[in-house]
Amino acid sequence: MTDSVVEVEGLWKTFGSVSAVEDLSFSIERGQVYGLLGPNGAGKTTTLRVLMGLERPTRGSTRLFGTTVTPSSPELFRVGALVEQAAFVPHLSGMRNLRLWWEAAGHHMRDADLDGALAIAGLGDAVNRKVKTYSQGMKQRLGFARLLLGQPELLVLDEPTNGLDPGEIREIRELIGRLTSQGATVLLSSHHLSEVEQVCSHALVMNHGRLITSGTVSELVGTTRSIYVEVNDKQRALAVLSGLAVVARVQVQGDGLVMELVDGQRSDVAAAIVSAGLQLETIMPTQRLEDAFLDLLAAGNAAQPQLHGTSPANSIGAN
Ligand SMILES: Nc1ncnc2c1ncn2[C@@H]1O[C@H](COP(=O)(O)OP(=O)(O)O)[C@@H](O)[C@H]1O
Ligand SMILES: [Mg+2]
């Protein structure tokens, strides 16, 4: 038998004439932190909903712990999912909400890992305050505490930082870090590239319902070596850098220039700029997975010219 926690094989999901997922396959092994990365409308939520038994596949199959899932599958008890917005009773405390939810599912509080869940959620004393006084980020952390009560073997998180402000995003990222350092297997979706780069061990990039690429995050990051420079004269630098053999696709972007390194070092670029008499103000790698992601989406779109819509670049980092 396989040790895969999640297996998706040739999954298709259509809604009327809309095809949300097309021929998607991937698998997740125990202990992996797997990112489903794609712009809005890529098919991430649909994939997670099918996986959780909330939607039936149009074609293909999904398995959790080696078993095909239906809405009543016992395997679902081994999964903690934040796929819909977590709802709470606003005039009750966080703690009362946790108890109510757990007991409503027919469990005894003594069987819940309350201490462990609260330690990871990091709500502190706020857990005794009414939920209506919570920020969006605190509600999200209470949502995590709730799904951790049953010590799930797999966590499925749909855009866990969506709608949060930067401070809250950092807190949720730290929370996920606490989880993964304890060896949890996690599947999370995001259109936030830096999030996947920082949190995940593996990632799958999808667009228009289709897989574009997958692999370890370090493999994906290795697909491009893009750098950003700022100089005192962009146009002259453009001319100088365009003539360098180690540089490809150099272009002006904002206050500086971005380019791909073909077979050279950042120092080669720095040396060429300086020896042309230009003043070098900044030279650094650009956001690496972001570049890989954009390149891959561009390549995926080129392969499917019949598909169009808003530019994927516009939806990335939209929130
Ligand atoms: N219940 C539904 N009925 C009709 N179309 C849907 C439904 N759910 C999703 N879609 C469509 O499927 C596509 C993928 O959506 P979704 O899985 O939500 O993408 P993502 O989560 O990556 O933003 C979109 O075009 C969306 O409009
Ligand atoms: Mg979604």
Image (cartoon, rainbow, N blue to C red):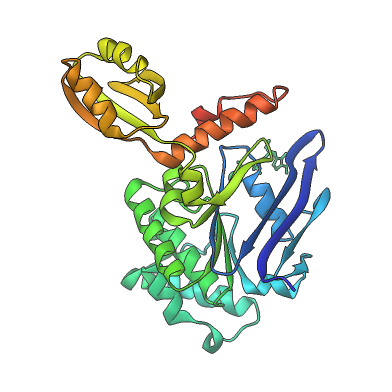
Of 102 and 204, nearer the camera is 204
What residue do we see at 59% from left, 48% from top? 214
Residues 258 and 48: in front is 258
Toward the viewer: 10 or 209?
Answer: 10
Q: Position of residue 202 (x, y in %)?
A: 53, 55
Res. 214 in view: yes
The C terminus, quarter of image: top left
Determine the quadrant in which ligand 2 lies.
Answer: top right
Residue 140, how many percent across, how many down? Answer: 46, 59
Q: Residue at left 40%, top 52%? A: 198
- How many marks the image carries: the answer is 0
Vertical arrangement, residue 221 with respect to residue 160, above or below: above
Judge left or right: residue 84 versus residue 165: right
In-front residue for pair 135/151 = 151
Based on the displayed image, in which of its 4 quarters is residue 289 positioned? top left
Q: What is the quadrant of residue 283 in the picture?
A: top left
- Residue 318 in view of the camera: no
Q: Is residue 92 left or right of residue 50?
A: left
Residue 188: percent from the left, percent from the top?
A: 55, 55
The residue at the point 42 percent across, 70 percent down is 181
Q: Quadrant of the N terminus?
A: bottom right
The percent coordinates of residue 146 (x first, y second) are 52, 70
Task: State the image quarter where residue 48 is shown.
Answer: bottom right
Vertical order, 262 against 144 (above or below): above
